[in-house]
Image (cartoon, rainbow, N blue to C red):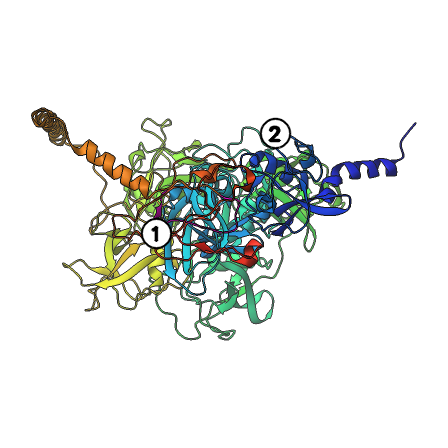
Amino acid sequence: MMVPARVLGLLLCVQFCMGSEVLRLVDGGGRCAGRVEVKHKGEWGSVCSYDFDWDARGASVVCRQLGCGTVAHASPYAPFGQGKGRIWLHPVFCRGTEATLQDCPNFGWGNHFCGHEWDVGVICTEALELRLVDGRGPCEGRVEVKLRGRWGTVADDNWNMNDAEVVCQQLGCGSATDTKFTWRDSQFSSPLMLAYVNCNGNEKAIWDCSIKGWGPYSVPRDYNTSVECQGFSRLAGGDSACSGQLEVRQGRAWVSVCHGHVDLMAAQVICRELGCSTALPLPGTGHFGAAAGPFWDGAFECNGTEPLLSACTRRPSHIKNCTQPAAIICTPYTRFQLADGGSECTGRVEVEARGVWRPLCATAWDLHDAHVLCRHLGCGSAVSLPPPGQFGTGTGTLLHDAFSCRGSERHPGECPVEVLGQPPCPHGHTAAINCSGVTEPLRFHGGESQCDGRLEVAMRPGVWARVSVGMWDNGTATVACQELGCGVPEKIYAALATGSGPMELQELRCDGTEELLAHCNASGMTTKTSHSHEELAIACSGSRRLRLAGGPGRCAGRVEVYSRGTWGTICQDTWTLQDATVVCRQLGCGWALEAPGSERFGPGTGTLWLGAGGCSGMEDALWHCPAPLERGCKHGSSAGAVCSGLLDLRLTGESSRCSGYLEVLHEGTWGRVCANGTSPATATAVCHQLGCGTGGRLEAVPAQGSDPAWLSWVSCEEGARLLWHCPSAPWQLQECDPTGITHIACEEDTSDRSEATSPAPALTHSTAPLMAAPRSTSALMVLCVILGMLLCLALVALAVQAQRARAQCQGPSKDAASEVVYEELDYSLMPEYQEVPSSTGSLSQGSATKMADHPRDGTEENDLQVSPGRDTGTDVHDSPAQPQHSPSHGYDDAMTVPEVPPSLHTRDALVQTPEDMGYDDAGVRALATSL
């Protein structure tokens, strides 16, 4: 006989929901923390147990029964106050596997051999929260824990990087980079939630560590345990920290993320997390080169509102053996518009950055920049550049950002931008554009430029239709490339469908002689819903692009060419300075200083592009040079270039790379920065760009020697992450005034860290034009090092022999007896504390020592020891009266204390207030310590 679905649902509800009806946690600030109470015969009553009975196993039954996660803390000493009514249960020796608390061995309902002072309490993990506050983001700041419904601080005078590592990993913020513990006297301090935290560094949560004190406690000190995390995600291999390949933290290593495992929503979260404003449409695969390491085994699914990428939903990987990393480009420019020109496609250029609209200065604005902006606005191509100021001056201060677009970018935010050293902009000198206003009837989507990618045709404004692989022919590709001004087709291939359009174009055939794609298929174009897994993709000759990879900036590195839909390298066999000169000019990077080989920027990956070389130095593009006739490459495919337009920075004059005089590289020469007019926020931008933390201190120091300076009046604003985006006086070799030169000391010194997050090191350390680094080490130097090591070993051996002879002459030492006496004195001041079933107690004075290892069960708090004041001069006071233990429970008179931690400072009064504890007599005398 079939059971009705409604009856079956009721039976299941009774089975799975019964636990919450007969069990609860009270006075803990929420349903997952508090005093354990059970319901029997319609009446609620408490649960009591002795310390040898109640541990994490019994508490785990409670947390699991309530659906509150796992156990964070368990205590039998009425930590949430004593109950007022019946004691219903006295469980003993729970195994931890029971379905409900009443399934544990017990003496029956209402039968117990303990009083309310033994009412057990539990804190489950679902009742706890962790956060970092008052920092520059969710992965930096003061550590706070939410306990009993309130946020409070964490205190530990031995707080270290292992503790900080657990905090960062738990928050999804990668590894810890810095941490410190400070305090100050305060009458209005935050409650202390956790005291004496000891982590190994591999725990999943901070409450999995050994914790001696569970609050809240009221203290006359304001404790500040601050942590700075490296972050869960980063962008590497780009021109700045706001563009590059996506890498995430896996344990203590960075791994790449597959290109198909991140979408635009995830990119928006990443850009916001990194403080890089907004994300541009995702570029094609290989945009920043090949991945340098292993791949993250999974995909991210974000809704766009998450504060961190680690908060997004993680899905299983759907791409096997991925080889292409995800590329992301963030931009501070959220919107562009043309104003006061009479139409949406003509007018004054205005840019929205960080929520503020500002007109753009016309000093560095050219037709290449205008072409990119017109296409981005859907206004066709740029027709002309009207005189600056023709459409008015607009409101707000002029934006000095100098765009250096090549014309093939899909968004102005993809163009290189520089502000540092730009000349001042005259009043009213605003950029203006006159776009054609004609929307292109077709486009290439998802490629590296507007001249390669998946072919799509406009059916009506804003609606695009795919072209299926079934209509694969050279005629269609030829007409499409010509109509878009992209030359001739170099490659036609099938690309996986990405869901960019719901419609698929049918019956498209071209002979290749038509001027426009609309002239093909004169009978008209029809569409149907797309079910194809592949789309037609084309790479036109106009999609060729050039870049310098593997260097410290966009104007120095290994020469790579984008052709036929892939990036390739250049053979260095016949590579000359004239060839490098063409590359530098084509990239807008000035002239060539060097033409190095693979020893400078490393070997490249991908195909070898043979159409380069033999340049005279006057060509306008590398592919216009007559390539050498010989084929093959004997000395490697890693031709490089170092251009005069390379910008770099460093801190010099001290042993650490994160502290010293600020110097910048311009036109191949290093120069200092004058301190006059340089803002304090400049230190933050420099330290962040060098990978030396997120803050620093700037000071003016007297100039020494005759080294020239390049810049003055560098005015970075708060939040700046790159020095190149800060306004300054124009580039000019100069002598600084009496104010002196700029010296910066970053907060984080990374000279001894195993992982460097800074860009590639400076190419030279002289104030002269760039020179190649030495390639060999002197044999004399090697010989001197070996002789020095042998001499050191001989001296060590002689010292050991002398020490042994001296020990034999002196006979037995008296130090051992003295150490025994001192040890015994220490133990007289170091009682081993035990918890008591009492609401009153005290802790003797001393300084708490951090324990190396503690068991994760209910007996962990019995190991707390305290030691006398440290040798820094802390006074050790007389021990207060020991707590009284009631003999009514049949125990020996063992000396015990309640489960509150010692105060962290001399003469502190660390108190759990009555309203927090749930009972009246909750005063706890302080343990005198010093930090």
Q: Which residue is mark 2?
A: 95
Task: Report x, y in % for residue 748.
Answer: 33, 50
- Of the residues shown, which amino acid type is indicated by label 1? Thr
Q: Which mark is residue 929?
A: 1
Q: Nearer the viewer, residue 16 or 226?
A: 16
Q: Nearer the viewer, residue 229 or 352?
A: 229
Query: Within 10 angstroms of label 2, few (less than 14), some, or many (20 or more) residues?
Result: some
Q: Is residue 53 above or below residue 729?
A: above
Asked if one can make out residue 245 in the rendered structure from this viewpoint, the answer is no
Q: Quadrant of residue 202?
A: top left
Q: Quadrant of residue 46?
A: top right
Residue range (magenta): 836-850
Q: Nearer the viewer, residue 368 or 200?
A: 200
- Residue occupying image coordinates x 54% and y 46%: 309
Task: Report x, y in % for residue 497.
Answer: 64, 38
Q: Earlier in the sequence, mark 1 or mark 2?
A: 2
Q: Quadrant of the N terminus?
A: top right
In magenta segment, residue 452: no
Left or right relative to 904: residue 350? right
Q: Is residue 649 above or below residue 577?
A: below
Q: Secondary structure at mark 1?
A: loop
Q: Secondary structure at mark 2?
A: loop
Left or right relative to 113: residue 221? left
Cα–Cα span, label 1 and label 2: 39 Å
- Residue occupying image coordinates x 43% and y 40%: 199
